[in-house]
Amino acid sequence: MEKHFGFFVKSTVSLTLFMCTTFSYAEMTLEQQVAQLQQQIQELQILMQQQKAVNDQIVAEIPKIQEHSIENTPVIKHTTKGDASFELYGNIRGDMSYQRKGPSTMYNLISAVPLKGTEAEHKNSNKFQSTLNATRFGFNFNTPVQGDHKIGGKVEMDFFGGSGRDTFRIRHAYITYDQWLLGQTWSNFNAVEYFPETVDASLAVGGSLTRVPQIKYSIAVDPKLNFALSLEDSKAETVTRTGTQNFTTDADAKLKLPSITGRINYKFDDKSILSGRVFLTEKRTNHEANDTFLAWGAALGGKYQITENTLLRMDYNHIKGDTKNLLWSNMAYVFDDHGHMQANEFDALTLGISHKITPKLRSTLGFGYMRADDDNTFANLVYGDETQNKALKQGWINVFYNPVKPINFGLEYMYGERETFNHKKGLDNRVNFTAIYDF
Protein backbone atom coordinates (compact mmCIF):
# COMPACT_ATOMS: atom_id res chain seq x y z
CA MET A 1 0.00 0.00 0.00
CA GLU A 2 2.88 2.40 0.76
CA LYS A 3 4.30 1.83 -2.74
CA HIS A 4 0.92 2.55 -4.32
CA PHE A 5 0.45 5.69 -2.26
CA GLY A 6 3.94 6.94 -3.15
CA PHE A 7 3.28 6.42 -6.82
CA PHE A 8 0.00 8.34 -6.55
CA VAL A 9 1.77 11.32 -4.90
CA LYS A 10 4.53 11.37 -7.50
CA SER A 11 1.99 11.25 -10.31
CA THR A 12 -0.04 14.11 -8.84
CA VAL A 13 3.02 16.31 -8.34
CA SER A 14 4.28 15.62 -11.83
CA LEU A 15 0.90 16.43 -13.36
CA THR A 16 0.75 19.70 -11.43
CA LEU A 17 4.25 20.70 -12.58
CA PHE A 18 3.31 19.85 -16.15
CA MET A 19 0.22 22.06 -15.99
CA CYS A 20 2.19 24.90 -14.43
CA THR A 21 4.89 24.79 -17.07
CA THR A 22 2.27 24.78 -19.80
CA PHE A 23 1.09 28.25 -18.76
CA SER A 24 4.68 29.51 -18.82
CA TYR A 25 5.37 28.38 -22.42
CA ALA A 26 4.44 31.73 -23.82
CA GLU A 27 7.15 33.49 -21.75
CA MET A 28 9.91 30.97 -22.67
CA THR A 29 12.06 30.91 -25.81
CA LEU A 30 11.65 28.06 -28.24
CA GLU A 31 14.92 26.52 -27.08
CA GLN A 32 13.83 26.63 -23.44
CA GLN A 33 10.46 25.07 -24.31
CA VAL A 34 12.12 22.12 -26.09
CA ALA A 35 14.47 21.49 -23.14
CA GLN A 36 11.58 21.66 -20.73
CA LEU A 37 9.55 19.13 -22.75
CA GLN A 38 12.51 16.72 -22.90
CA GLN A 39 12.86 16.86 -19.12
CA GLN A 40 9.14 16.18 -18.64
CA ILE A 41 9.26 13.21 -21.05
CA GLN A 42 12.16 11.68 -19.09
CA GLU A 43 10.20 12.09 -15.85
CA LEU A 44 7.17 10.35 -17.41
CA GLN A 45 9.35 7.46 -18.61
CA ILE A 46 10.75 7.01 -15.10
CA LEU A 47 7.21 7.01 -13.65
CA MET A 48 6.06 4.41 -16.22
CA GLN A 49 9.00 2.15 -15.36
CA GLN A 50 8.12 2.46 -11.65
CA GLN A 51 4.47 1.63 -12.39
CA LYS A 52 5.49 -1.49 -14.40
CA ALA A 53 7.67 -2.71 -11.53
CA VAL A 54 4.77 -2.29 -9.10
CA ASN A 55 2.38 -4.17 -11.42
CA ASP A 56 4.88 -7.04 -11.87
CA GLN A 57 5.25 -7.36 -8.10
CA ILE A 58 1.46 -7.49 -7.61
CA VAL A 59 1.08 -10.19 -10.29
CA ALA A 60 3.93 -12.20 -8.75
CA GLU A 61 2.32 -12.06 -5.31
CA ILE A 62 -1.11 -13.31 -6.42
CA PRO A 63 -0.12 -17.03 -6.85
CA LYS A 64 1.76 -16.92 -3.58
CA ILE A 65 -1.28 -15.58 -1.77
CA GLN A 66 -3.53 -18.27 -3.33
CA GLU A 67 -1.03 -21.06 -2.60
CA HIS A 68 -0.61 -19.94 0.97
CA SER A 69 -4.36 -19.86 1.56
CA ILE A 70 -4.80 -23.41 0.15
CA GLU A 71 -1.97 -24.92 2.18
CA ASN A 72 -3.22 -23.40 5.38
CA THR A 73 -6.86 -24.39 4.94
CA PRO A 74 -7.70 -26.51 8.03
CA VAL A 75 -8.19 -30.25 7.35
CA ILE A 76 -11.70 -31.38 8.27
CA LYS A 77 -11.50 -33.49 11.42
CA HIS A 78 -14.19 -35.84 12.74
CA THR A 79 -14.60 -35.31 16.44
CA THR A 80 -16.91 -36.62 19.13
CA LYS A 81 -18.74 -34.68 21.81
CA GLY A 82 -15.83 -35.44 24.14
CA ASP A 83 -13.36 -33.85 21.66
CA ALA A 84 -11.88 -37.18 20.57
CA SER A 85 -10.89 -37.47 16.92
CA PHE A 86 -11.90 -40.69 15.20
CA GLU A 87 -11.64 -42.58 11.93
CA LEU A 88 -14.10 -45.00 10.38
CA TYR A 89 -12.83 -48.21 8.78
CA GLY A 90 -14.10 -51.64 7.82
CA ASN A 91 -14.99 -53.80 4.86
CA ILE A 92 -17.88 -55.12 2.84
CA ARG A 93 -17.35 -58.86 2.43
CA GLY A 94 -19.23 -61.43 0.38
CA ASP A 95 -18.42 -65.15 0.88
CA MET A 96 -19.47 -68.19 -1.14
CA SER A 97 -18.79 -71.90 -0.69
CA TYR A 98 -19.44 -75.05 -2.68
CA GLN A 99 -19.29 -78.01 -0.34
CA ARG A 100 -18.73 -81.53 -1.62
CA LYS A 101 -18.85 -82.83 1.96
CA GLY A 102 -18.81 -80.93 5.22
CA PRO A 103 -20.72 -79.32 8.11
CA SER A 104 -24.17 -77.79 8.15
CA THR A 105 -22.72 -74.30 8.61
CA MET A 106 -21.49 -71.86 5.98
CA TYR A 107 -17.97 -71.60 7.43
CA ASN A 108 -15.45 -74.04 8.83
CA LEU A 109 -16.66 -76.42 11.56
CA ILE A 110 -14.19 -79.27 11.12
CA SER A 111 -14.77 -80.64 14.64
CA ALA A 112 -18.40 -81.43 13.85
CA VAL A 113 -18.47 -82.56 10.20
CA PRO A 114 -20.83 -85.55 9.74
CA LEU A 115 -19.30 -88.98 10.00
CA LYS A 116 -18.96 -91.15 6.92
CA GLY A 117 -22.06 -93.06 5.84
CA THR A 118 -24.49 -91.08 8.02
CA GLU A 119 -27.67 -89.35 6.90
CA ALA A 120 -26.18 -86.02 8.00
CA GLU A 121 -23.27 -86.51 5.58
CA HIS A 122 -25.68 -87.10 2.70
CA LYS A 123 -27.80 -84.09 3.70
CA ASN A 124 -24.81 -81.72 3.71
CA SER A 125 -23.18 -82.95 0.50
CA ASN A 126 -23.05 -81.02 -2.80
CA LYS A 127 -24.31 -77.79 -1.27
CA PHE A 128 -23.83 -74.15 -2.29
CA GLN A 129 -23.97 -71.38 0.33
CA SER A 130 -23.33 -67.64 0.40
CA THR A 131 -23.51 -64.79 2.90
CA LEU A 132 -22.31 -61.26 3.73
CA ASN A 133 -22.31 -61.83 7.52
CA ALA A 134 -18.54 -61.32 7.84
CA THR A 135 -18.92 -57.65 6.82
CA ARG A 136 -17.56 -55.41 9.58
CA PHE A 137 -17.00 -51.79 10.53
CA GLY A 138 -15.27 -49.98 13.35
CA PHE A 139 -13.92 -46.73 14.79
CA ASN A 140 -10.49 -45.82 16.12
CA PHE A 141 -10.49 -43.01 18.70
CA ASN A 142 -7.74 -40.67 19.84
CA THR A 143 -8.17 -38.08 22.60
CA PRO A 144 -5.78 -35.12 22.84
CA VAL A 145 -4.44 -34.67 26.37
CA GLN A 146 -1.89 -32.43 27.98
CA GLY A 147 1.49 -33.83 28.86
CA ASP A 148 3.01 -37.06 27.60
CA HIS A 149 -0.01 -39.36 28.10
CA LYS A 150 -1.73 -41.10 25.18
CA ILE A 151 -5.42 -42.01 25.36
CA GLY A 152 -7.33 -43.88 22.68
CA GLY A 153 -9.81 -46.63 22.02
CA LYS A 154 -11.54 -48.86 19.51
CA VAL A 155 -15.04 -50.13 18.82
CA GLU A 156 -15.49 -52.77 16.09
CA MET A 157 -18.61 -54.71 15.11
CA ASP A 158 -19.77 -57.30 12.60
CA PHE A 159 -22.70 -59.62 11.87
CA PHE A 160 -20.89 -62.90 12.55
CA GLY A 161 -22.13 -63.72 16.03
CA GLY A 162 -24.37 -66.39 17.52
CA SER A 163 -24.49 -70.11 16.85
CA GLY A 164 -25.66 -69.45 13.29
CA ARG A 165 -22.94 -66.83 12.67
CA ASP A 166 -25.61 -64.39 11.57
CA THR A 167 -26.05 -62.11 14.61
CA PHE A 168 -24.81 -58.55 15.15
CA ARG A 169 -22.04 -58.48 17.75
CA ILE A 170 -19.23 -56.39 19.22
CA ARG A 171 -15.80 -57.71 18.26
CA HIS A 172 -13.59 -55.14 19.98
CA ALA A 173 -14.42 -52.46 22.53
CA TYR A 174 -11.58 -51.08 24.62
CA ILE A 175 -9.74 -47.99 25.83
CA THR A 176 -5.97 -47.47 26.04
CA TYR A 177 -4.01 -45.27 28.43
CA ASP A 178 -0.30 -45.26 27.67
CA GLN A 179 0.74 -48.93 28.09
CA TRP A 180 -2.59 -50.00 29.64
CA LEU A 181 -5.57 -51.54 27.84
CA LEU A 182 -9.01 -52.10 29.37
CA GLY A 183 -11.88 -53.77 27.52
CA GLN A 184 -12.57 -56.56 25.07
CA THR A 185 -10.07 -57.48 22.36
CA TRP A 186 -7.84 -60.37 21.25
CA SER A 187 -6.67 -62.56 24.11
CA ASN A 188 -3.03 -62.07 24.96
CA PHE A 189 -2.68 -65.79 24.14
CA ASN A 190 -4.15 -65.28 20.67
CA ALA A 191 -1.86 -65.47 17.62
CA VAL A 192 -3.90 -64.53 14.54
CA GLU A 193 -0.85 -62.90 12.98
CA TYR A 194 0.97 -66.26 12.87
CA PHE A 195 -1.88 -68.17 11.25
CA PRO A 196 -1.55 -68.86 7.49
CA GLU A 197 -3.95 -66.73 5.43
CA THR A 198 -7.29 -68.36 4.61
CA VAL A 199 -10.34 -67.40 2.57
CA ASP A 200 -12.52 -68.96 5.28
CA ALA A 201 -13.37 -66.25 7.84
CA SER A 202 -13.40 -68.88 10.63
CA LEU A 203 -9.81 -69.98 9.99
CA ALA A 204 -8.96 -73.69 10.23
CA VAL A 205 -7.57 -76.29 12.67
CA GLY A 206 -5.19 -74.69 15.16
CA GLY A 207 -6.60 -71.19 14.66
CA SER A 208 -7.82 -68.87 17.38
CA LEU A 209 -10.22 -65.92 17.33
CA THR A 210 -10.54 -65.45 21.08
CA ARG A 211 -11.68 -61.98 22.17
CA VAL A 212 -12.30 -61.54 25.90
CA PRO A 213 -12.69 -58.73 28.46
CA GLN A 214 -9.29 -58.02 30.00
CA ILE A 215 -6.82 -55.66 31.62
CA LYS A 216 -3.46 -55.68 29.85
CA TYR A 217 -0.13 -53.97 30.46
CA SER A 218 2.48 -53.89 27.69
CA ILE A 219 6.18 -53.15 28.12
CA ALA A 220 8.58 -52.29 25.29
CA VAL A 221 11.96 -53.41 26.63
CA ASP A 222 13.70 -52.19 23.47
CA PRO A 223 12.77 -51.81 19.76
CA LYS A 224 13.10 -55.58 19.26
CA LEU A 225 11.70 -57.00 22.52
CA ASN A 226 8.32 -56.44 24.14
CA PHE A 227 6.32 -58.12 26.88
CA ALA A 228 2.61 -58.10 27.78
CA LEU A 229 0.78 -59.36 30.87
CA SER A 230 -3.01 -59.56 31.15
CA LEU A 231 -5.82 -60.59 33.47
CA GLU A 232 -8.62 -62.03 31.32
CA ASP A 233 -12.19 -63.13 31.87
CA SER A 234 -12.36 -66.88 32.53
CA LYS A 235 -15.79 -67.86 31.25
CA ALA A 236 -17.53 -71.09 32.25
CA GLU A 237 -16.69 -74.01 29.98
CA THR A 238 -19.13 -76.17 28.07
CA VAL A 239 -18.90 -79.68 29.54
CA THR A 240 -20.72 -82.98 29.86
CA ARG A 241 -21.56 -84.71 33.12
CA THR A 242 -22.24 -88.11 31.60
CA GLY A 243 -19.46 -88.71 29.09
CA THR A 244 -22.08 -89.15 26.37
CA GLN A 245 -23.64 -86.25 24.46
CA ASN A 246 -25.41 -84.28 27.18
CA PHE A 247 -23.33 -81.14 26.65
CA THR A 248 -24.19 -77.95 28.45
CA THR A 249 -22.45 -75.05 30.14
CA ASP A 250 -21.49 -76.14 33.63
CA ALA A 251 -24.28 -74.53 35.63
CA ASP A 252 -22.29 -75.07 38.82
CA ALA A 253 -19.09 -73.48 37.55
CA LYS A 254 -17.62 -71.14 40.16
CA LEU A 255 -15.23 -68.65 38.66
CA LYS A 256 -13.16 -67.02 41.39
CA LEU A 257 -10.08 -65.76 39.59
CA PRO A 258 -9.30 -64.29 36.16
CA SER A 259 -7.00 -66.05 33.73
CA ILE A 260 -3.39 -64.85 33.90
CA THR A 261 -1.77 -64.59 30.48
CA GLY A 262 1.75 -63.58 29.52
CA ARG A 263 3.37 -62.99 26.15
CA ILE A 264 6.85 -62.08 24.90
CA ASN A 265 7.73 -61.09 21.31
CA TYR A 266 11.13 -60.67 19.70
CA LYS A 267 11.65 -59.03 16.29
CA PHE A 268 14.67 -59.87 14.18
CA ASP A 269 16.43 -57.55 11.75
CA ASP A 270 15.00 -59.41 8.75
CA LYS A 271 11.40 -58.71 9.98
CA SER A 272 10.99 -62.25 11.34
CA ILE A 273 9.22 -62.56 14.73
CA LEU A 274 9.27 -65.17 17.48
CA SER A 275 6.56 -65.21 20.15
CA GLY A 276 6.06 -67.23 23.35
CA ARG A 277 2.74 -67.26 25.29
CA VAL A 278 1.42 -68.88 28.45
CA PHE A 279 -1.81 -68.80 30.44
CA LEU A 280 -2.96 -70.19 33.78
CA THR A 281 -6.55 -70.28 35.03
CA GLU A 282 -8.54 -72.03 37.74
CA LYS A 283 -11.47 -74.31 36.92
CA ARG A 284 -13.83 -74.77 39.84
CA THR A 285 -17.31 -76.26 40.21
CA ASN A 286 -19.93 -76.73 42.91
CA HIS A 287 -21.10 -79.94 41.24
CA GLU A 288 -21.07 -82.87 43.69
CA ALA A 289 -17.40 -83.11 44.76
CA ASN A 290 -16.84 -79.33 44.48
CA ASP A 291 -13.75 -80.13 42.48
CA THR A 292 -11.10 -77.75 41.15
CA PHE A 293 -7.96 -77.86 39.01
CA LEU A 294 -5.57 -75.50 37.23
CA ALA A 295 -5.94 -75.28 33.47
CA TRP A 296 -2.91 -74.06 31.55
CA GLY A 297 -1.45 -73.62 28.13
CA ALA A 298 1.84 -72.79 26.44
CA ALA A 299 2.49 -71.74 22.86
CA LEU A 300 5.37 -70.85 20.58
CA GLY A 301 4.90 -69.24 17.21
CA GLY A 302 6.19 -66.72 14.76
CA LYS A 303 6.97 -65.92 11.18
CA TYR A 304 10.16 -66.19 9.16
CA GLN A 305 10.90 -64.08 6.07
CA ILE A 306 12.48 -66.68 3.77
CA THR A 307 12.86 -64.27 0.87
CA GLU A 308 11.53 -60.82 0.09
CA ASN A 309 8.34 -62.36 -1.33
CA THR A 310 8.08 -65.61 0.67
CA LEU A 311 6.89 -65.82 4.29
CA LEU A 312 6.67 -68.85 6.60
CA ARG A 313 4.17 -68.83 9.51
CA MET A 314 4.08 -71.38 12.33
CA ASP A 315 2.33 -71.81 15.68
CA TYR A 316 2.36 -74.65 18.23
CA ASN A 317 0.04 -74.96 21.26
CA HIS A 318 -0.21 -77.37 24.18
CA ILE A 319 -3.35 -76.87 26.30
CA LYS A 320 -4.91 -78.66 29.26
CA GLY A 321 -8.47 -78.12 30.52
CA ASP A 322 -9.45 -75.14 28.39
CA THR A 323 -11.37 -74.60 25.14
CA LYS A 324 -11.55 -70.80 24.84
CA ASN A 325 -8.02 -70.21 23.66
CA LEU A 326 -8.13 -72.42 20.56
CA LEU A 327 -10.86 -73.30 18.09
CA TRP A 328 -12.01 -76.82 17.18
CA SER A 329 -10.85 -78.48 20.42
CA ASN A 330 -12.88 -80.90 22.59
CA MET A 331 -14.71 -80.02 25.77
CA ALA A 332 -12.51 -78.61 28.53
CA TYR A 333 -13.38 -81.34 31.01
CA VAL A 334 -15.95 -83.98 31.93
CA PHE A 335 -17.16 -85.30 35.27
CA ASP A 336 -16.47 -88.87 36.28
CA ASP A 337 -18.77 -91.07 38.37
CA HIS A 338 -17.52 -89.45 41.58
CA GLY A 339 -18.13 -85.88 40.41
CA HIS A 340 -14.47 -85.09 39.82
CA MET A 341 -13.36 -82.97 36.86
CA GLN A 342 -11.29 -84.80 34.26
CA ALA A 343 -9.48 -82.47 31.88
CA ASN A 344 -8.91 -82.79 28.17
CA GLU A 345 -5.30 -82.29 27.03
CA PHE A 346 -4.17 -81.74 23.46
CA ASP A 347 -1.54 -80.39 21.06
CA ALA A 348 -2.15 -78.26 17.98
CA LEU A 349 0.14 -77.15 15.16
CA THR A 350 -0.34 -74.83 12.18
CA LEU A 351 2.15 -74.31 9.40
CA GLY A 352 1.88 -72.28 6.21
CA ILE A 353 3.93 -70.67 3.49
CA SER A 354 2.79 -67.56 1.63
CA HIS A 355 4.32 -66.30 -1.60
CA LYS A 356 3.81 -62.99 -3.39
CA ILE A 357 3.70 -64.06 -7.04
CA THR A 358 3.26 -60.53 -8.43
CA PRO A 359 2.47 -57.18 -6.75
CA LYS A 360 -1.22 -58.03 -7.23
CA LEU A 361 -1.23 -61.81 -6.78
CA ARG A 362 -0.38 -63.89 -3.70
CA SER A 363 -0.92 -67.50 -2.61
CA THR A 364 -0.80 -69.55 0.61
CA LEU A 365 -0.39 -73.26 1.27
CA GLY A 366 -1.40 -74.16 4.83
CA PHE A 367 -1.84 -77.12 7.15
CA GLY A 368 -3.43 -77.48 10.62
CA TYR A 369 -3.39 -80.44 13.00
CA MET A 370 -4.84 -81.17 16.44
CA ARG A 371 -4.34 -84.35 18.46
CA ALA A 372 -5.85 -85.03 21.86
CA ASP A 373 -4.30 -87.24 24.50
CA ASP A 374 -6.10 -90.59 24.11
CA ASP A 375 -4.47 -92.21 27.15
CA ASN A 376 -6.11 -90.36 30.03
CA THR A 377 -9.38 -90.43 31.99
CA PHE A 378 -11.03 -87.83 29.74
CA ALA A 379 -10.42 -89.99 26.65
CA ASN A 380 -11.79 -93.08 28.38
CA LEU A 381 -14.95 -91.25 29.48
CA VAL A 382 -15.73 -89.89 26.00
CA TYR A 383 -14.60 -92.95 24.02
CA GLY A 384 -18.11 -93.66 22.73
CA ASP A 385 -19.00 -89.99 22.27
CA GLU A 386 -18.79 -89.22 18.56
CA THR A 387 -18.86 -85.46 19.10
CA GLN A 388 -15.37 -85.59 20.62
CA ASN A 389 -12.28 -86.02 18.47
CA LYS A 390 -8.96 -87.75 18.91
CA ALA A 391 -7.54 -85.94 15.86
CA LEU A 392 -8.36 -83.14 13.42
CA LYS A 393 -6.43 -82.17 10.32
CA GLN A 394 -7.00 -79.68 7.56
CA GLY A 395 -5.05 -78.49 4.52
CA TRP A 396 -5.77 -75.61 2.14
CA ILE A 397 -4.37 -73.77 -0.82
CA ASN A 398 -5.59 -70.38 -1.98
CA VAL A 399 -4.87 -67.47 -4.25
CA PHE A 400 -5.73 -63.81 -3.62
CA TYR A 401 -5.97 -61.21 -6.38
CA ASN A 402 -5.67 -57.52 -5.50
CA PRO A 403 -6.47 -55.61 -8.74
CA VAL A 404 -6.63 -52.22 -6.95
CA LYS A 405 -5.75 -51.24 -3.40
CA PRO A 406 -9.15 -51.65 -1.65
CA ILE A 407 -10.33 -54.79 -3.50
CA ASN A 408 -9.38 -58.43 -2.80
CA PHE A 409 -10.72 -61.58 -4.46
CA GLY A 410 -9.86 -64.94 -2.91
CA LEU A 411 -10.31 -68.52 -4.14
CA GLU A 412 -9.46 -71.53 -1.96
CA TYR A 413 -9.64 -75.30 -1.88
CA MET A 414 -9.86 -76.82 1.61
CA TYR A 415 -9.79 -80.48 2.64
CA GLY A 416 -10.16 -81.76 6.20
CA GLU A 417 -10.77 -84.86 8.26
CA ARG A 418 -11.80 -85.63 11.82
CA GLU A 419 -11.37 -88.87 13.76
CA THR A 420 -13.28 -89.72 16.93
CA PHE A 421 -11.81 -91.60 19.89
CA ASN A 422 -13.58 -94.74 18.63
CA HIS A 423 -11.90 -94.33 15.21
CA LYS A 424 -14.81 -93.09 13.10
CA LYS A 425 -14.10 -90.41 10.50
CA GLY A 426 -15.79 -87.44 8.88
CA LEU A 427 -14.68 -85.42 5.83
CA ASP A 428 -14.64 -81.74 4.91
CA ASN A 429 -14.16 -81.08 1.19
CA ARG A 430 -15.05 -77.69 -0.30
CA VAL A 431 -14.15 -74.64 -2.38
CA ASN A 432 -14.36 -71.15 -0.86
CA PHE A 433 -14.57 -67.76 -2.57
CA THR A 434 -14.55 -64.25 -1.12
CA ALA A 435 -14.79 -60.68 -2.43
CA ILE A 436 -13.70 -57.94 -0.02
CA TYR A 437 -13.87 -54.14 -0.34
CA ASP A 438 -11.87 -52.37 2.38
CA PHE A 439 -12.78 -48.81 3.31
Image (cartoon, rainbow, N blue to C red):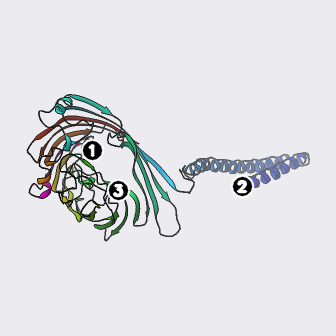
Foreground mark, 1 or 3, reads: 3
- Residues packed near mark 1 inside 10 Å, few (<14), some (14 to 19) or many (20 plus): some
- Residue type of the residue flagged with mark 3: Val
Residue 141: image x %, image y %? 47, 55
Tell me which segment is drawn in magenta.
356-378
Residue 416: image x %, image y %? 15, 41
- Residue type of the residue flagged with mark 1: Ser
Residue 284: image x %, image y %? 28, 63
Q: Is residue 99 above or below residue 223?
A: above
In this view of the protein, which residue sits in the foreground, 105 or 48?
105
Residue 87 in view in this figure: yes
The circle on residue 202 is 1
Task: Inspect the magenta stretch and tell me whether residue 112 lies in it.
Answer: no
Kindly indicate the quadrant of the structure image that contains residue 159: top left
Q: Is residue 348 left or right of residue 76?
A: left
Residue ID for mark 2: 3
Foreground mark, 1 or 2, reads: 1
**In the rendered structure, which disc, 3 or 2, sits on the residue that comes first in sequence?**
2
In this view of the protein, which residue sits in the foreground, 357 or 277?
277
Residue 268 in view in this figure: no
Residue ID for mark 3: 212
